[in-house]
Structures are given as C-alpha cells and as structure tokens.
Amino acid sequence: MKIIQVENYNQMSKEAASLLIDEISKNPSLAIGFCTGGTPLGLYKELIKSYKNKKVDFSMVKSFNLDEYYPIKKSNTNSFYYYMFHNLFNHINIKKTNIHIFNGDSKNPDRECLDYEKKIKRNSIDIQIIGVGVNGHIGFNEPGSFFASKTRKVKLSKQTLKINSKYFKNSKKIPTYALTVGIGTIIGAKKIILLASGKNKAAAIKCLYEREDPCFPVSFLRKHKDLTVIIDKKAGSLLK
Ligand code: GLP
C-alpha cells in the first residue's frame, strides 16, 4: 500500500482530487466507486471547482455508489442518493444514465443487491474512493464481515447507528439496515483510494497498516495490489 500523509483535511481532499482528475484525463470513461459521509465532502468540492474551471470532464464517467440505508426513499435528505446529487452530481456534467446508486426503497432488497453486484461485475470499477467508519467499517461492511462478502443487505451496528444518527433530524428515524457493496466486490476494483481524517480514525488506520483483523474490516484492503491511503496527521497519529 502507498500511504500519503498530509497535514490536514483540506490537503487530503486536494490530493485525492488531483489523483482522480489525473485518472479521468487518462481514461475519460473511468468507472468510479463513490462513497459518502463527511470524509469525501472536501474532495467533491474540489472536483466541482475543477469542473467549473474546465479542468475535468465527467461526460463519459460512470459512477457506482458504495452503499445506501434501507429502507429509505431517494427524496429523503438523509439518503445517500440525495447526498450524491446534492454534493456532487447536480454540479458536474455526469450523465444521469451513467449514475448507479442502490434503490433503498426496493420491495426486494436481496434482488436489488444481486442486480447491483451484476452491474458492477459487468462494468468493473476502475477506482474506488472509500472512507472508513470509526469502527473500521467500509461501505456498511461492519466488524465481523467476511473478506469474500458480496453485495447484500446488512444490519447496522449499534456504534454506527449512534454515530450516523447525528445526521438525522430525528435520530430515532435512522434506518437500522443498509445495502452495501461487499468487501469481496470492493477488492475487485482496479485501484482503491482510501481517505481518512481525524483522530477517531487513527485506530482503524493503525490496524490497516499492521495486520488483517475482521474486527476492522478496512484492514482487508491490505490485500489489494493498488491501494493508496491518503490520511491527515491525526488519522496517522498511531502509525510508527
Ligand atoms: C458511513 C458510510 C461509509 C463512510 C463512513 C465514515 O457510515 N457508510 O461509507 O466511510 O460512514 O463516515 P465519515 O466520513 O462521516 O466519518
């Protein structure tokens, strides 16, 4: 793995944006796996800025989101569907037909996951942008998830519900399930860029650096041949 340690969140976002823009310029029809949460917001702002300055063109880019709450409607401002359009897609020239996000309102979540997995397999992700939960989860693959796990419906852990409920106006309204791309599927991406900022991510990053441990699913990414980890000083504070 390649670790790029920068000073702070803004530098992490800029570094990630420049890597991604470089890849899009080499392959304009890049298939990108996008993630949500607070971590990639700075990256998305940088991408929008570069698009407005005509430094990047998303017209042929394909996107595949990593996860979604279940059940949740697209119109719910807490859905990852809403998040992606609000924070990125509405501001760049990506084609709507090239955007793939789970339907968190599907009547048949297992079928939804099977179809999503097939879509990813057909296209194959060129670059997966990924964050990490405080408990080491990636996507919504909570601690205890298997290395070979596929895209599926999962129950959210108590810790994730507690942390993520801060984004909900009524914290009791947070869905207790989610649909997530599996670890085995994430590992299938050609390149992975992991972002982490802040002291609360330091333990997960330490584990990723030192050993494979199902208690921190992020550590399974150690096995990937092309993993770039961009962290700020605080997220890297437990590394020797
Ligand atoms: C969420 C998402 C993850 C994300 C993580 C970290 O639960 N499912 O994909 O990486 O939490 O979020 P944050 O970046 O806000 O710390």
Image (cartoon, rainbow, N blue to C red):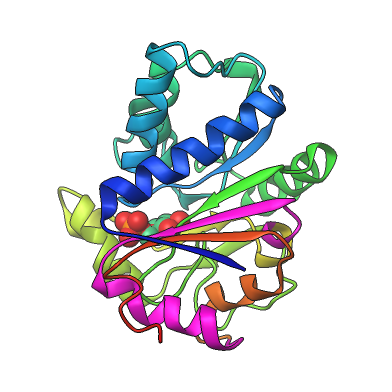
Q: Can residue 31 be spotted in the picture?
A: yes
Image quadrant where residue 31 sits = top right
Between residues 120 and 108, which one lies in front from this camera angle?
120
Report x, y in % for residue 55.
48, 17
Q: Is residue 198 magenta?
A: yes
Image quadrant where residue 83 sits = top left
The quadrant the N terminus occupies is bottom right
- Vertical order, 197 against 101 (above or below): below
Q: Is residue 99 left or right of residue 72?
A: right
Which region is colored magenta?
186-213
Image quadrant where residue 239 sits = bottom left
Q: Is residue 58 left or right of residue 175?
A: right
Q: Residue furthest right?
A: 122
- Vertical order, 163 against 33 (above or below): below
Report x, y in % for residue 204.
42, 78
Between residues 170 and 194, which one lies in front from this camera angle?
194
Q: Is residue 97 magenta?
A: no
Report x, y in % for residue 13.
36, 44
Q: Can residue 75 be spotted in the picture?
A: no
Residue under the image location 33 percent in, 35 percent down = 76
Report x, y in % for residue 67.
52, 50
Residue under the image location 53 percent in, 78 percent down = 208
Residue under the image location 72 percent in, 27 percent down = 27
- Vertical order, 46 against 233 (above or below): above
The quadrant the C terminus occupies is bottom left
